[in-house]
Image (cartoon, helix red, strand yellow):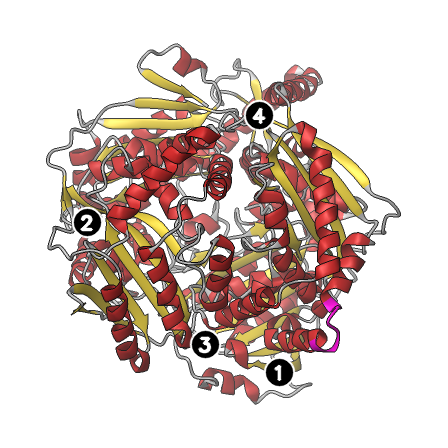
Amino acid sequence: MHRIIKPGKFARIFAKSQRIHHCRLCSSVQNAVKKYKDGDKIHGYTVKKVVEVPELMLTSVVLHHDKTGAEHLHVARDDSNNAFSVMFRTTPMDSTGVPHILEHTTLCGSRRFPVRDPFFKMLNRSLSTFMNAMTASDWTMYPYSSQNQKDFENLLSVYLDAVFFPQLRELDFSQEGWRLENENPEDKSSPLMFKGVVYNEMKGVFSNKDNIYCQAVQNELLPNHTYGVISGGEPSKITDLTWEHLKNFHASHYHPSNSRFYTYGNFPLEKHLEYINNNYLQKFNKIDIDTKVPNEPRWTEMRRKHITCQPDPMAPDPEKQTTVSVSYLLTDISETFESFTLSIIGALLMDGETSPFYQSLLVPKIGSDYAPMTGYHGDTKDSAFSVGLQGISSNDVEKVTQIISDTFDKVVSEGFEQKRIDALLHQIELGLKHQSSNFGVKLTLAISHNWNHDTDPVESLQINKYVEQFRQKLQDDPQFLQNKVKQYFKNNKHCLLSTMSPDEKFEEKRKEEESTRLQKMVEKLTDEDKEQIYKKGQTLLQQQMDKEDLSCLPTLHINEIDRKIIEEKAATVTSGKVPVQLCVQPTNGITYLHMMSNMSDVPSDLKPYVPLFCDVITKMGAGSMDYKELSQQIELTTSGLEAGTHVNQHHSDNYSYEQGVEFSSYCLDRNVDKMLDLWTNIFCSPNLKDEGRLMTLVMMEAANLSSSISGQGHSYAMTHCSSRMNAAAQLKEVLGGMAQVSTMKTLAETDESAVITIVEKLQKIGQFLLNKNNIRFAINSTSEQMSSNQNKVETFIEGIPGDIKSTEKYTQHGYFEPELVKTQFELPFSVNYMSKAVETVPYTHEDFPILRVLSRMMSAKYLHREIREKGGAYGSGAVCGSGVFSFYSYRDPNSSKTLQVFDEAVKWVVEDKFVPEDVDEAKLSVFQQTDKPITPGSAGMTLFLSGITDEMRQTMRDRLFQVSKQDVINVTKKYLTGDRPAAVSFIGPENSTVKTDNTWKVIKG
């Protein structure tokens, strides 16, 4: 997976990243590593230092491998979800995508595990809570996590063998990277074309104009070394990469002397070190590897760069599709306190409605939203900051750049309000206490950039130290922040002015370039070369189809899985005649609040506006507060006030579903009263009349939805075709599918004189939702805090309007007739997103667990091979939802061919072309999803949001264990064959097959 790194805020690294099972300040797990002293020797390693980090409830051990120089960071923490990663500094000097393609090819078989694609096969032989590999601009990382010690050790063996002893076969390079192959591999007369998983992945990445912009800005701002190229690969350059270059890159970069190991959790350190040393590191000697990235030479004057992209057919105003930003190169990220300070300044400048740039750039509605890359970036050797606007007129470029300059002048002159600084420091405090899932993996990602450039990784963890230092600097020098702004923004000559505008022929030029490149390559081929290409294609096809002996791969077995669920105990009481679910959890001094307001009474013509209502209701002001004051109070006292639509299929009935709006927030226990006061103001006296503010938010949301399609096309396609299967899915399309994208585009095009109509619709929605008529609550907190919280919520209920009704929670729709509909959304992408959906059964039906197993087995055993390995798509799968079974593909070069594969997958099952072991692996994959860690703040949410009880979950688990091979065949015949209606939707470029087939409905973007 290639990562286009988005803005990261060092100050908030941990804001939503923690998971703690026990909130003891110092656990036995930590005590076990505190015995080590600097200089101690352990299994070939030397302890460099042991550091306790109380704010994160962990103790770190930094080690150095004596023979190879490999670095190792162990984080001891009372968390059963243990994590591992190994990272290499990978610094390409061209845009062939060599580190990215190597990341893929490394996982295609190793010395000890010489099977095709052991990584994907382990996905179904493991209970991992996370498995992936990723390539950033200057590092490649292989992380995973698991709660099961045997599973952790199984994955460790596969990962280490993959990175240090990969097979790197030429055919794997051809499959994952790029190759010339006949369009039909079995027909040598068919035309030659470029194929390859990464080749198509990157075509998909750069179908998104935001990615084009982010990549270009980084390349231009840091042009002199590895950041001046595209580590993921530019499609026009990928075809220059050779197999030999790939192998040489592995030899020079994937060596222990260039590695950084990370282990996390409650498993013993000694066992990790012993295994890594004895089985891998001892086989290597230390070598000198120069992969260091130098600091970028500083410029003496501003530079300019213009970029082109494809037009956005979803843009509200075709004449306002220009993007402009100003980017500054800052300081070396090894200067950790300086980087922390700059991240704080970046947040103060950009974040929240009261920030200077929000007020100067977004409020005047010159553009639709901040430009891509806006914010502080600490993911390159030298940090950077960008600020700008997208969705502007080309005539407004100079106007925007002048506003940026003037805003910096104003900040230098006036500084930042103390309340904004206090709010940001409060967010850091809250973030350090909040517990979210997979902290171990998030932690390795958080420290990766600094550690990769030889900064002490523990330095990045000690947030309290930096907060105290920051407070002291402010106390010692009231001009501290203003001087920094002057230094890094007003007096900084390393400054890039970037602009991007649409080119109507952009996609046409891209296709012409690919065609010309292909033609030049083909023209050089002799008949013998073409014969060799055909034979290689046949060999690859045969390899992809060969039955493999997987006995060398480790696996967990079904009988090793606990047959009992982990219960999420919650009690429902009545407070002020309203149901309140109470879930006592070790929440570390935080109270979590959820409110569900039923929206079944909202008229159907208002439903498309409910997502907008959710987006704006906490951002428009309330009570005596305008939107700026409300925003500031939210940041000072809570994590944020959130609202979102909720549509949930009834667990036992395809014709019933719950529809509502979920309001949620959390805060430190000391701030519960203030949090509820804010919600009281929003429920009792929301301000929806500020038309200028409303249209700012409308334009931002429309821009966000439009840009999300290329990255989430498969989700949009699945949502659309599922909407033909039942009423709940139909409403999801209205609220969150392509229908909602279209709704927001229309609203963003609204003439100013008609905005009052939108206001009136939102006010009507508020009359249905902002009351206690049909509302219910959930509270998660400690036992010590729960009684107080319950009383406070009861007071809140008494203070909001409405008369409590005893209406049904679920909407009864009656019979819904599924439809056979085929739809294409025609958009200017280089790849397709395909989906097909059929109606099935709800959660509690006896066939549902079998369908879940079927979906996982199809995904791993058939669709992956046919759509990714053979077809070249980046991803594919089958998904079993309540009432709907869906197929999908992601960043797919094919369209109708993939739809055929969906049908062939059904035939593969019905014709009994799989083995019982395939079913067992699919069960493991399902358990992997159901057994993911539950955080204290989210415990009980399955019951609250879906009505699924612990008893239902246990029944589901019992049935999963019982699923047999014949069961899978039977449900496939029952639901996926015959004349049952199936809907098909896809998103992609103009399609010749669809164009000539009048059974398709084409919706042009």
Q: Percent x, y for residue 631?
A: 49, 58
Residue 305, quarter of the rendered image: top right
The span shown in magenta is: 475-480
- What residue occupies the far front of the structure in this picture? 624
Residue 971 in the figure: left or right of residue 260: left
Is residue 229 visible to the viewer in this orientation of the structure? no
Residue identifier under label 1: 50
Name which residue type carries label 1: Val
Residue pointed to by mark 3: 266
Mark 4–mark 2 Cα distance, whole angstroms, equals: 43 Å
* Number of other residues with Cα within 10 Å of mark 4, as a class: few under 14, some 14 to 19, many 20 or more: many
For marks 1 and 3, the one nearer the N-term is: 1
Which mark sits nearer the N-terminus, 2 or 3?
Answer: 3
Could you tell me which residue is drawn at 59 percent across and 24 percent down? 319
Q: Residue at x 80, y 59 (%)?
A: 487
Q: Which residue is mark 2?
A: 843
Q: Amino acid at mark 4?
A: Pro
Q: Is residue 833 above or below residue 451?
A: above
**Residue at x-position 51% and y-position 55%:** 628
Q: Mark 2 against mark 3, which lies toward the viewer?
A: 2
**Disc nearest the viewer among 4 and 2:** 4
Lower sequence index among marks 4 and 2: 4
Query: From the viewer's perspective, is 404 left or right of 629?
Result: right
Q: Could you tell me which secondary element the residue under label 4 belongs to?
A: loop
| Left or right relative to 713: residue 646 | left
Among numbered discs 3 and 4, the one appearing first in the sequence = 3
The residue that mark 4 highlights is 311
Element at label 3: loop
Residue 159 seen by the camera: yes
